Image: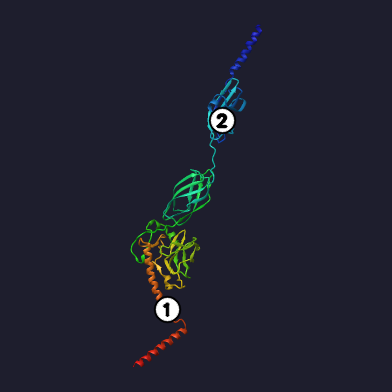
Amino acid sequence: MKITTLVVIGLAFIVLPAMALAATPTAITRPATSIVTDSAVLNGDYNSNDTATDVWFEWGTSYAQVFSRAGTKVNEIFGLTGLGPINYQLTGLTPDTNYYFQIVASNSAGTVPGAVRDFKTFIAPVSNPAPILTSISPASGTQGQTLDVSLTGADFASGISSVNFSGSGITINSTTVSSSVLITVNITISSSAIVGNRDVTVVNSAPGGGTSGVQTFTVNATVVINSGGGGGGGGVILTQNNNSNNNNNSSANTSLKPVAATSLATSITLDSAKLGGVADIKGTSTTTAYFEYGKTILLSGTTPMQNVGSSGAVDFYATLENLSSNTIYYFRAVVTNQYGVDRGVIRIFKTQNSAGTITSDENETENIVQNVDTDTENENAVLEPENENIGEDVISVNEDISKKSLLASVVAGARNLAPRNMAEWLFLASVILGLVLLARHLFFVAV
């Protein structure tokens, strides 16, 4: 009995000191790193305190879940001794989501969790689509005009889509993205904007995004018609837009503006006439030309536009048909390109009467109404009646022309009596000789 007691006491002296030497581990949770949209690296430090220690991470989507040790266990490593860092890449996460985690260390002396930390995954990047532009309305505007332009297409988005007009002279006042298929922009066209076409595009910003295809918007010249005015003969005056902004084009653009010249009308019949003009193209811009015409100085009709090239002086023509017989017509040449519009002088011609003749001298076609060219620095100059009663002005002009036509008819009749060949000259000479002999005979008989 004594021997047994001594053995137990001896073992106690050996085992109890050894147990006293075992200690709980230390666990420290470090911040997560390498955080992206769907993964992150968990970090921590451990100290085994010289006792074999198991280490792992626990994670979840709520603080309470992890704090209560109900999180998901990952990366368990057994029997570690000493101290050091430990990490683990957590994958398959949801973008833009909060996560919680802690390190846990455990040995024979106990289990110790580290503090609970959190992190948030990044938002997944959104790739904006490239916009599609199919049409714009209206597709043109006039110098000095403010208007709304509607753009239709697809993949438009507020805060992402913007509208661009190429060149200068057009200001975008506001942009409204009404839906993914409609944008409305309010624009102002400068009174000095260069006449011609502009490229219109829609741009979606990054990430992704891009630029749409091109639609065309045309800037037209302003035509200014003023009522009333000062005196002047013939019932017509030359008026022009006095807005100084219209003359703000650069000297280079002014020097490149084309010049129009109106030629005489030819091939005049009962119901048709051939109009002529010359386009003097200063630069290398593609130029178009046409004629304005009508029965009054207001020139209510236009001929189809024709391409006259991009350099030099070019003759161009247009034939008017289905005209009224024995009627005075007014016309002038017009040329235009991206540098401006120019109008030639207004000329007149008169169609033949039902007998197939022109009732006035053919040279009447050389008459020029207000023999001045359109101001080359102001493409908006127009001819108009002086008085408010346009009808009376036109009648006054026509009456004056009719008087000239009557005088011309008398002169033309006299010219028709003149001999046109040798036989007619001989016949005229014999008639004159006969008259002289008759007069002499009568004289002697009387004596």
Q: Residue at x 43, y 80 (%)?
A: 417
Please state if 96 lies on the left or on the right of 254 as rendered: right
C-alpha separation, residue under disc 1 versus residue under disc 2: 118 Å
The type of residue carrying mark 1 is Arg
Q: Report x, y in % for residue 25.
A: 57, 23
**Residue 91's quadrant in the figure?**
top right
Depicted 414 relative to depicted 266: above or below: below
Contact, CB < 8 Å: mark 1 with mark 2?
no
The x and y percentages for residue 288 are 48, 61
Relative to 354, residue 215 above or below: above
Asked if one can make out residue 236 in the rendered structure from this viewpoint, the answer is no
Which colour style is shown? rainbow
Locate the N terminus by quadrant: top right
Mark carried by residue 43: 2
Disc 1: CA contacts within 10 A as few (<14), some (14-19) or many (>=20): few
The three-letter amino acid code for the residue at tag 2 is Asn
Disc number at residue 415? Answer: 1
- Residue at 64%, 11% in the rendered image: 8
Q: In the image as oriented, which residue stretches furthest toward the top?
A: 1
Q: Please, is residue 116 above or below residue 178 in the view?
A: above
